[in-house]
Amino acid sequence: MRWPPRRRSGARGAAGSAGRDPSRPGHDEPDDRQQDATDHEHRHGHRRALPAEPGERRDGGCGASPAGGGTASGPSSTPPAAPSSPSSPEQGTPTASDSVAPDSIAGTVVRFAAGDTVVRVTIVEDTPTTRDFLSMLPMTLPFEDYAGMEKIAYPPRGFDTTGNAGMTPKAGDLFSSIPWGNLGFFTDAGALGHSDQLVRIGTTDDLDGVMRLDGQDVTIRIAG
């Protein structure tokens, strides 16, 4: 299991395999998608969705609890510290007025811009997390790939996740992983199931645009 992920290191496994002792577990990095999905389950506390037994009612919504009635377990390692400050935008400085959250939170559109790429994200509902996210705007963050399934960045601090019911990831979701305090897009949710360690912030249909954010300094602000 890759824990924690290397941050902004370029390619995964850049150090190569030289000098690694194959007899020590955890030193060889997997390169198949099945292992990537397994890593995500450990990192985010996912459980895979299982088919319902005859006569059993299974709630697949955000309020569903992990099998056995408990909560999904979070990572055992301490998450990495977030950057002390976001990067400065290259095209103009965001104005302070952009940081004021609008009165109507649900349906608010947020722009993720890098060069000619602009991804528009719609806030899904009014929650402490979405309000906190909007209050932090504008900000510029470097985005990077994680396991070919996410594009992630690290805000100056984590979000208020009071009352979070968890989520079942879908491609195009803008989310935060609670233990890591990050901000990211799912580009491929694979077979990942519900996780109490994730909180949905918004959603977009522009997956091609999200893919182009990889490796870019992305300016995030409320759409005017």
Image (cartoon, rainbow, N blue to C red):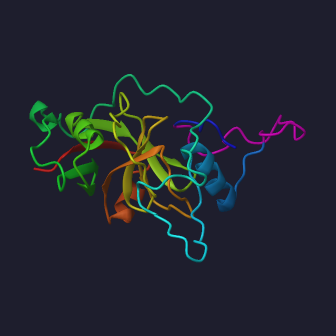
Relative side of 123 to 78, left or right:
left
| Residue furthest to the bottom | 54
Instruction: Choose top left, top right, bottom left or bottom right for residue 162.
Output: top left
Which residue corresponds to the image point at 46% horizontal and 63% vertical from the top-left?
A: 60
Q: Is 15 contained in the magenta span?
A: yes
Question: What range of the chain is rendered magenta?
Answer: 8-27
Which residue corresponds to the image point at 33% horizontal and 64% vertical from the top-left?
A: 206
Instruction: Choose top left, top right, bottom left or bottom right for residue 156.
Output: top left
| Residue furthest to the front | 55
The percent position of residue 205, horizontal first and vertical second, equals: 32, 66
Q: Nearer the viewer, residue 183 or 20?
A: 183
Q: Nearer the viewer, residue 75 or 219?
A: 75
The percent position of residue 187, horizontal first and vertical second, equals: 45, 60
Q: Which quadrant would the N terminus be assigned to in this image? A: top right
As drawn, 49 above or below 109: below
**What secondary structure predominates along the stretch shown in magenta?**
loop
Relative side of 46 to 113, left or right:
right
Q: Is 172 contained in the magenta span?
A: no
| Residue furthest to the right | 23
Total label count?
A: 0
The percent position of residue 213, horizontal first and vertical second, equals: 38, 51
Which residue corresponds to the image point at 59% horizontal and 60% vertical from the top-left?
A: 48
